[in-house]
Image (cartoon, grey):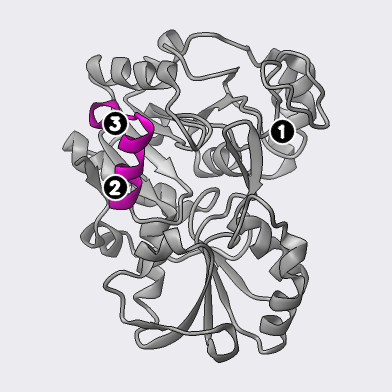
């Protein structure tokens, strides 16, 4: 089993979860010509400039069902050259559960050095609410997030805190199905911890809604939400501390590269935190011609036009790829 962020590291950092998205100022975007962002097929040359990678999991390392062989080969090659690979995920599950899932999808232990997840941060936040009556809004598979925590799981009507890890059935439901439930919770002013800020992810060739979509709706209704994960700084601070422990010394931010498929999470978060990024164009934003998947960008291959449409409010990355490959 690989390493993962433990309580000692989180306490040292002194995490405070965020309530608003810390996107960089739009002035930053004007300084970069999106059309000059290269679309590359190999990360070997660019990625070798860095000492550590922060790699998103879902959409980069696997599609929710099976590993991407080229991504596994890439992270293995970077590690073999002396680099450090941290898998940085908005999964609502603690790292140990995520690592077990990675193996089941075909991502081996030697493809990374450690994991840092939204679930790890959510448990840190839950520790501040000892004895609280908590309503878990999410599927049964995410219950490990509460293991060993001093909280009482109750129904929505009795809750003083909501932990949202996703939809109960993300294959058939949408956020609108939860409008009534969320309205009732908002009327009682029940605060929410969002254990996964992602709005949607790929599962195979499909796109499914995540906890972030429910949290966004809750905020629209007037609810109070704190977020655990990208694009917020605490998860990057924890990742930075994990890199320091693995390297045996402090690694500067300019020596760290973030790799992800989420424009508003991976790329925005990296820019806000001051690390470079590479965008992996999964079906989340750019459909794959092989799947016939369709969205507002159509079926064309990844090019400068796609990037100009995607990076209108978020500083563009150093490079873009269709899939992570060495």
- On whether residue 321 falls in the magenta region, the answer is no
Crowd tier of the residue under label 3, counting other residues whose Cα lies within 10 Å: few below 14, some 14–19, many 20 or above: many
Residue 254 position in % (x across, y down)? 42, 30
**Residue beneath label 2, please?**
241
Alpha-carbon span between mark 1 and mark 2: 28 Å
Seen in the picture, residue 127 relative to 101 is either above or below; the reply is: below
Crowd tier of the residue under label 2, counting other residues whose Cα lies within 10 Å: few below 14, some 14–19, many 20 or above: many
Contact, mark 1 vs mark 2 (Cβ under 8 Å): no
**Residue beneath label 3, please?**
112
Q: Residue 29's mark?
A: 1
Seen in the picture, residue 285 relative to 72 is either above or below; the reply is: below
Closer to the N terminus: mark 3 or mark 1? 1
Q: Is 208 displayed left or right of 183 in the figure? A: left
Crowd tier of the residue under label 1, counting other residues whose Cα lies within 10 Å: few below 14, some 14–19, many 20 or above: some
Q: Nearer the viewer, residue 5 or 236?
A: 5
Indicate the quadrant where residue 37 lies: top right
Q: Nearer the viewer, mark 3 or mark 2?
A: 3
Residue 197 position in % (x across, y down)? 57, 54
SS of the residue under disc 2: helix
In the rendered image, the quadrant that contains the N terminus is top left
Residue bounds of the magenta highlight:
96-111
Total residue callouts: 3
Residue 135 position in % (x across, y down)? 51, 79
């Amino acid at each position: 089993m690989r390493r993962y962020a433990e309580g000692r590291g989180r306490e040292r950092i002194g995490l405070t979860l965020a309530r608003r998205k810390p996107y960089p100022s739009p002035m930053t975007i004007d300084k970069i010509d999106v059309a000059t962002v290269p679309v590359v097929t190999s990360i070997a040359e660019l990625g070798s400039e860095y000492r550590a990678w922060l790699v998103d999991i879902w959409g980069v390392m696997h599609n929710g069902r099976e590993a991407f062989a080229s991504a596994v080969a890439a992270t293995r090659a970077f590690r073999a050259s002396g680099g450090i690979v941290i898998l940085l995920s908005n999964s609502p599950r603690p790292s140990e559960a995520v690592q077990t899932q990675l193996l089941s999808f075909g991502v081996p232990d030697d493809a990374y050095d450690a994991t840092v997840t939204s679930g790890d941060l959510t448990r840190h936040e839950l520790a501040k609410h000892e004895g609280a009556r908590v309503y878990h809004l999410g599927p049964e598979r995410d219950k490990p997030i509460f293991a060993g925590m001093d909280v009482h799981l109750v129904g929505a009507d009795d809750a003083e805190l909501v932990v949202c890890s996703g939809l109960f059935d993300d294959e058939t439901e949408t956020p609108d199905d939860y409008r009534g439930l969320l309205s009732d919770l908002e009327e009682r002013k029940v605060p929410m911890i969002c254990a996964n800020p992602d709005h949607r992810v790929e599962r195979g060739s499909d796109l499914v809604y995540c906890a972030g979509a429910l949290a966004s709706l809750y905020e629209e209704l007037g609810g109070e939400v704190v977020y655990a994960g990208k694009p917020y700084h605490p998860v990057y601070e924890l990742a930075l501390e994990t890199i320091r422990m693995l390297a045996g010394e402090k690694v500067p931010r300019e020596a760290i590269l973030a790799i992800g498929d989420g424009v508003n999470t991976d790329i925005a978060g990296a820019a806000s935190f001051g690390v470079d990024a590479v965008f992996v164009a999964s079906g989340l934003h750019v459909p794959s011609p092989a799947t016939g998947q369709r969205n507002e960008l159509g079926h064309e291959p990844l090019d400068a036009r796609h990037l100009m449409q995607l990076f209108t409010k978020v500083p563009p990355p150093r490079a873009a790829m269709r899939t992570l490959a060495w």
